[in-house]
Amino acid sequence: MQPFDDEQISLFLDNWYNSRFADPQQAQRWKESLQKALGENDRIKLLARNPLLLTIIALIHRYQAVLPKQRNKLYEKAVDTLLVSWDKNKELSNHQRLKYLDIDDLKRLMELLAYWVHTQGTVGKNEEGGTVIDKDDLIEKLNQEIRELKELKLYQAQEETERFLELIQGRTGLLNEQGQDYYAFVHKTFQEYLCAQEIQYRAKNEYDLGVILNCIGENLHDAHWREVLLLLIVEQNPKAAAKAIRMILENGSEYEEWLHRDLLFAGYCLPENPKGMRKADSKLVQEILEKLVELEVSKEEQVGDKVRSQVFQILCSLGETDFEKQALEMLKERSDLIDEKRLLGYQVKLGEKDQVIPLFLEKLLEKKDYEPLFFWRFDSVAIFDQIWEDIVNALLPLLRDENSDVRGSAAYGLGFLGKSSEDVVNALLPLLRDENFNVRGSAALGLGFLGNSSEDIANALLPLLRDENFDVRMSAAYGLGNLGNSSEEVVNALLPLLHDEHSDVRGGAADALGKLGNSSEEVVNALLPLLHDEDSDVRWRTAFALCELGKSSENVINTLLLLLQDENSNMCWKAAFALGELGYSSEEVVNALLPLLHDEHSDVHDSAADALGKLGNGSEDVINALLPMLGDENYRVRWRAAGALGKLGKKSHKILLLPQVSQLIQKHQDSEYLGTSIDLLWDLLVGE
């Protein structure tokens, strides 16, 4: 089952509410209400990408008008919907012929099953579903649990197991067949939630908080148990929750002084919004927030990108919790030490969105500063989802501004937002005929960013391939390549541009043809001569285009290897990048990349390090060449080297790398290069 994107979610909700309300305005109000709820809760929005879960969420919203704020309460409602309310007008015992189990037994049995399944580990675990379990093992476990639960004879339990599986798989959908002889929970969320409920049941049954604390202690920082533990903690009363979080904060995990994993996990407990925390432990929340803010205001070179990314995610997740106001006040008190785009992001997520939008528009239109938008769109989707509609509504009128610079900036900005609504497309199309070439080019780029491959957009861009201005021709080629419309008409219109007098246009056309994926003999034969173009950028773009088309011949590899020696450093790093993307890790390629690690240009040895990481050749020569780069004076080089070593370490050399990285960190405790070594340590121990 493929996950829904935003457009598919919107279409589903249109159909859902239009089929349930005769009044279109009422249907629209309900749809907007649910969309708002999804936009305000990142985790629930992620669940909504699963079609089954979106249906359940819509059902809960339909009958309760609002979604529960706490996700454990939402999961409770979702499980109840699947087990009880999905077909509430039919008697369970009559409809499904369950002879011994009643409604109250169903959830109890699913909790037992979820705990058993979860303790099997992650073997066979797919991306969305839970752990995959052998059918015979599942039946044997159900026989045992049903027999004990209802005090049945073996043959009675076996018969009831068959009926139970038919019900759970066929009517509730909680379990799905995975292939011929395997089962798994339809979504890992259900496995995790029900597993947490089982642990909670055991603790209550034994009147022993130690059951929960022991589970946390045994599984803390095991990624497989992360969500279970968070869901378990939020189920506790205030005093017990505070005790569990305090235990985590003071756990003393290995490398805590550098990785802060205990602090970060304690921090992730706060977005769950456990009630009564301040009353139970007045100092705990303050202590956690103070430590998180201290990491936020510390220099990135000292803390590392991985840890700072976690801090950003935690603090942004405190919106609409009991800790929102406190966190924002503490951040604003230290605002002089916080990067502007991060501070604006905090304000968006922690209740000051309306104050941020005008500041952002000023940066976008007057200063042509797209950095915050780039950061929010690619590094923090949750922030981007919360502001994009407001920004679109502010930019649309500016497409008609008398100032061409304003029109061009607004067109580019709307495209960069990447939200291809009908209103946005219809507003951009007329600008393709604007009298100002910058506006035409910006509109072409903007439409390309949107990625809408409709025939109308492609047809509107095609004439611009013949525009008198070469920038417009290049932008139109880029736009068509990004749209993904590989019709014969589009391809035939791009081919002549490979001979354009301007190298930027030739390179743009080659780039577009590579993205469109048409690997016909005509396209390949037209591209091959450009491997010898007088312009090195065209040669690189052509080689990369042929790689994208699956034509990475010896000729292409040799062209890229020659470009590694180009006197233009810009060509060197691009060629290294292309070789890394190709994944062709021959000895010749690796040996050609290694000397570039000592190139005088930082962008060259940066790209070479990244390529070696992608190629996955973890030889001693490669690792020994990369390790010294962790001390390079250029932060980006250090970051790339750490990333490359992290990839190589995860493949086969973790045992070799861990002690070396640990010694490197200890040796350079006060160095401004410490952060990249911490990033590498994070990759080796925690992963991406």
Image (cartoon, rainbow, N blue to C red):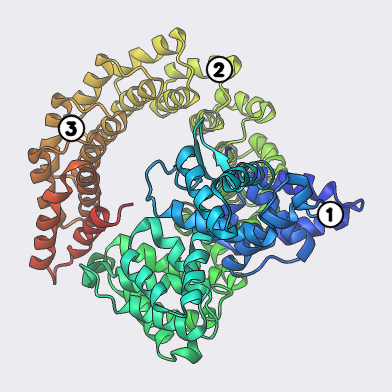
Q: Residues within 10 Å of mark 1 (few under 14, many from 20)?
A: many
Q: Is residue 163 visible?
A: yes
Q: Quadrant of residue 588?
A: top left
Task: State the residue at coordinates (57%, 44%).
Answer: 155
Q: Quadrant of residue 41?
A: bottom right
User: Secondary structure beneath disc 1?
Assistant: helix
In the rendered image, residue 589, in percent from the top left (x then y), is placed at 17, 27
Q: Is residue 223 left or right of residue 603?
A: right
- Residue 204, compared with residue 666, is above or below; it is below
Quarter containing the N terminus = top right
The residue singled out by tag 3 in the image is 567
In the rendered image, residue 226, in percent from the top left (x then y), is placed at 41, 62
The residue singled out by tag 1 in the image is 27
In the rendered image, residue 360, in percent from the top left (x then y), is placed at 54, 63
Q: Amino acid at mark 3?
A: Glu
Of residue 239 and residue 539, the one placed in the foreground of this image is 239
The residue singled out by tag 2 in the image is 493
